[in-house]
Image (cartoon, rainbow, N blue to C red):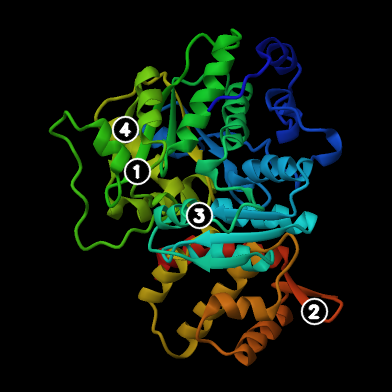
Amino acid sequence: MWFELDLEKIKQKFSQIKINNKFWDYKFAFPEIEEDFIISLGEGGTPCRSSKQFGEKLGIKNLYFKDETQNPTNSFKDRTAALLISHARSWEFDKIICASNGNQGASIAAYCSLEGIECLNIIPKEIDIGKKAQMIAYNSEIKIVGETVDDAIDYILNQNDFENYYQCTSELNPLTLEAQKIIAYEIINQTEKPKWVIIPMGSGELLVSLWKGFNELKEINIINDVPKLIGVQSQSSSPIVNEFLKESEHKIKPTQNVKPIALGILVKKPLFKDLAIKCIKESEGTVIAIPEKLILSSIEELVRSEGIFAEPASALTLSAVQLLDQKQMFEPKDKIVCLITGSGLKAPYVLEAISSQTKTTGKGSIIITKLKILSQISISSIQGISGTKIKETMGSISLAAIYQHLKELETKGLISRKKEGKNVLYFITDSGNKVLDALDVLITLL
């Protein structure tokens, strides 16, 4: 469903936008919401950085990274949460429901917490622990349903208990596309027109959102053509790629006996599959599925070469550049934008990598536990997190042990505390952030 918008108004207002403008500076491109209902945590306006090293290694002079990890809860979904929760407020809803596999639920929980709105997140069993931790930190109620987000969405659609809830599931609320299309607006404002834009795909709705944004700018003559869109999935789960290639002998066979690590795009029945394929074909783009074994190396490459700590789903775009360049897809002068959707702090792959290469007893185990606690505090940095809520995400470790680790982290200046009523909340310090920024070095050395 497309909203009918005043394209002439968009053309007039877009010309006044500056490179560093934030999300709500583009409100002229949304269905109207009264000013009094608009909420924000400072989302949008994320950088589109020219590659520092990786592009040069490949001989690609114009490689860019649109870094959505710079949003308040470290993912592109903060844009969606800002618009949806503002819209919910304008309709006087006091309860929200959301089915997601991570980033959407975490962002929705944060914005609901800001407004004191009740939030219910329906999540699958397979989800990055950091995203679940954010939901808990922002006081969201959580219900686990099924193995993947498909099961969570089916659960919502087949229940009659949620009539009084505002629907924040990204696949079920068309305002999601309106919010996310602003990434396309920003890319054009920051880089002029790229030839290629590479996008991770789960349900396909993010790619459709960007196509919508680019197409609107084409209709008002800001750009002449929509950039060629490249949709990326993991070989462990690539239903959109396979449908796109169904007439081809290059159809991807799922990787056998390999646990998927790009959980943020683990979707078996993508609701936007057909529309995403239509958008890719209309843009004269293509698709690619990435072998699991390349994902971790791409994450490390992003940190080492570009200073971007990305979650596995985001790192797929870097792998795509590398593999497609080997197939001579790009010309040397082509301008290419990789979309980095979320932070690596939300996914436990780094800590698991350290754990697999370190003794699980003695100091090795203690260091791993402290790093896990530090990462949980970091992803809850907007309003802090209590020891009890850290315990909820950490599992078997005792609460007493949690507080002992917190005391030691505070003594070392890696975290700080603040008392609010009866609760003590913990926040990461600059020194703590520097420790997390150095995790890739630890992996290299182990």
As drawn, 250 above or below 395: above
Q: Tell me, yes or no, if residue 442 can be seen here.
A: yes
Q: In the drawing, does residue 31 fall left or right of residue 291?
A: right
Quarter of the image where the C terminus is located: bottom left
The disc labelled 3 sits on which kind of residue?
Answer: Ile
In this rendering, the answer to whether 159 lies above or below 196 is: below
Marks 2 and 1 sit apart, C-alpha to C-alpha, by 42 Å
Within 10 Å of the Cα at label 2, are there few (<14), some (14-19), or many (20+) other Cα atoms? few
Pinpoint residue 56: horizontal percent, then vertical percent.
42, 33
Front disc: 3 or 4: 3
Viewer-closest of 45 and 133: 133
For the residues labelled 1 and 3, the Cα–Cα distance comes to 25 Å
Judged from this view, the residue extending furthest toward the front is 160
State the CA–CA distance, disc 2 to disc 3: 33 Å
Residue to which mark 3 is pinned: 156
Q: Image height check: is 234 above or below 191?
A: below
Measuring 66% from the left and 57% from the top, which residue is drawn there? 109
Q: Is residue 232 left or right of residue 343?
A: left
Mark 3 and mark 4: Cα distance apart in space: 30 Å
Mark-to-mark CA distance, 4 and 2 = 49 Å
Q: Nearer the viewer, mark 2 or mark 3?
A: 3
Residue marked by disc 1: 233
**In the depicted view, which residue is nearer to us: 422 or 382?**
422
The amino acid marked with disc number 4 is Val
Secondary-structure class at tag 2: strand
Q: Which residue is mark 2?
A: 423
**Badge 1 density bin: few <14, some 14–19, many ≥20, Cα 10 Å:** many
